[in-house]
Amino acid sequence: MTSELAVKVDRVRGVLSERGLTSVTLTSRESLAWLLGGARVTVPTNGDPVLSAHVTHEELKLFVFANEVERMQREELAALGELDVVPIPWHEPLPPLPAGAEPEASLAAELRAARAQLLPVEIERYRALGSDLARAVTAVARELRAADSERHAAAALAHAVIEAGAEPVVLLAAGAGRLGLRHPLPTTAPLGDRAMLVVGARRHGLIANLTRFVGDASDADERLLEVEADAFAATRPDRSLAEVLADIASAYPAHGFQPSEWLNHHQGGPTGYAGRDPRATPTATDLVTDGQAFAWNPSAPRTKVEDTVIIADGKVEVLTADPVWPTTDVNGVLRPLPLPFV
């Protein structure tokens, strides 16, 4: 067992000890990809995992569909050392919970906390993904023209993401006529004089998210960056996500937006092995952990800002940054401005 896997198994066993339990069976993509060092555990990108992992205080056992065993062992699990793999016929369901095992869902909050603080090896993977994704988006954005359609932009982004060895998780594009939508699935509409590109991509199990604008700038863009800066400042260890969200909500009127603006779209939250792990809500009790990844995404009519960051020791490290993209300094953090059309 590699050191990374050993640390993560120990964290799961710590959860078992805290709850007085003997075992748990992990079945979600997020937990399995985290435990297994970023292994690709699904075949349809957002499909059900092809394996489950049973963790006790003494052993780790993987149950894998037989038609996936060779690929998983050779391409996804080989770096993890010797593992106990049990093949399951493809036409049968993965085994039910062993006697006394706890279902993952009943430990969801504890398992989120277990994977919140990233290991150094995970941070290196994340930095590489963030850099590759940001550069890919820049390359696509530089080639876009006002007459191009939203679907053309999304297709180019998908091509760039896959070429980077990642899987597209979110691909949104809005031209000037559809910027009022917070989740603009691409259409044949032209980009016009201002366009929004939103990308989420997964590699090694980790998901990086970013939003970029191409074309004209607006006063609201820079005011929204101040809202985001307040979000970063509010994200401090041992604060609940509900407390952070309350500060973000207060930041909107402080920077010239309607007090209710935060209600018009979710504001993001922790990220990592899920797009938001979890999304911040007024009742979210999860606590911020030092060295955790976040993707806050404040938005307002026709504008939005989003990057994947790690907040540690009171500092914000932007993972999804490309040095050639135009930026402005906001409280010591370089933040993106719209890229003009050529």
Image (cartoon, grey):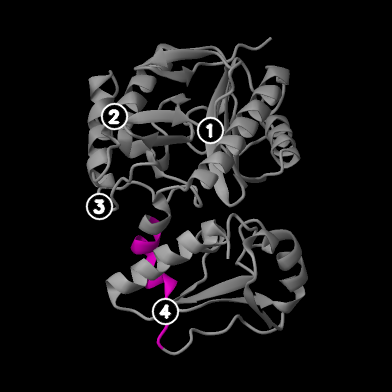
The residue indicated by pointer 4 is: 23
Q: Is mark 3 on a helix, strand or loop?
A: loop
Question: Is residue 211 left or right of 113 when viewed as pictured?
Answer: right
Q: Which of marks 1 and 4 is nearer the N terminus?
A: 4
Q: What element carries label 2?
A: helix
**124 above or below 79?**
above
Question: Is residue 241 left or right of 267 when viewed as pictured?
Answer: left
Distance of mark 4 from mark 2, alpha carbons?
A: 38 Å
**Which labelled disc corresponds to residue 233?**
2
Label 4: few (<14), some (14–19) or many (≥20) C-alpha neighbours in 10 Å:
many
Distance of mark 1 from mark 2, alpha carbons?
A: 19 Å
Label 1: few (<14), some (14–19) or many (≥20) C-alpha neighbours in 10 Å:
many
Looking at the picture, tell me which residue is in the foreground, 181 or 318: 318
Predominant secondary structure, magenta span: helix
The residue indicated by pointer 1 is: 210
Task: Specify start and end residues of the magenta stretch as a single range.
Answer: 100-112
**317 above or below 7?**
above
Q: Quadrant of residue 81?
A: bottom right
Comparing labels 4 and 2, the label whose residue is closer to the camera: 4
**Which labelled disc corresponds to residue 283?**
3
Looking at the picture, tell me which residue is in the foreground, 60 or 64: 60
Disc 1 marks which amino acid? Answer: Leu
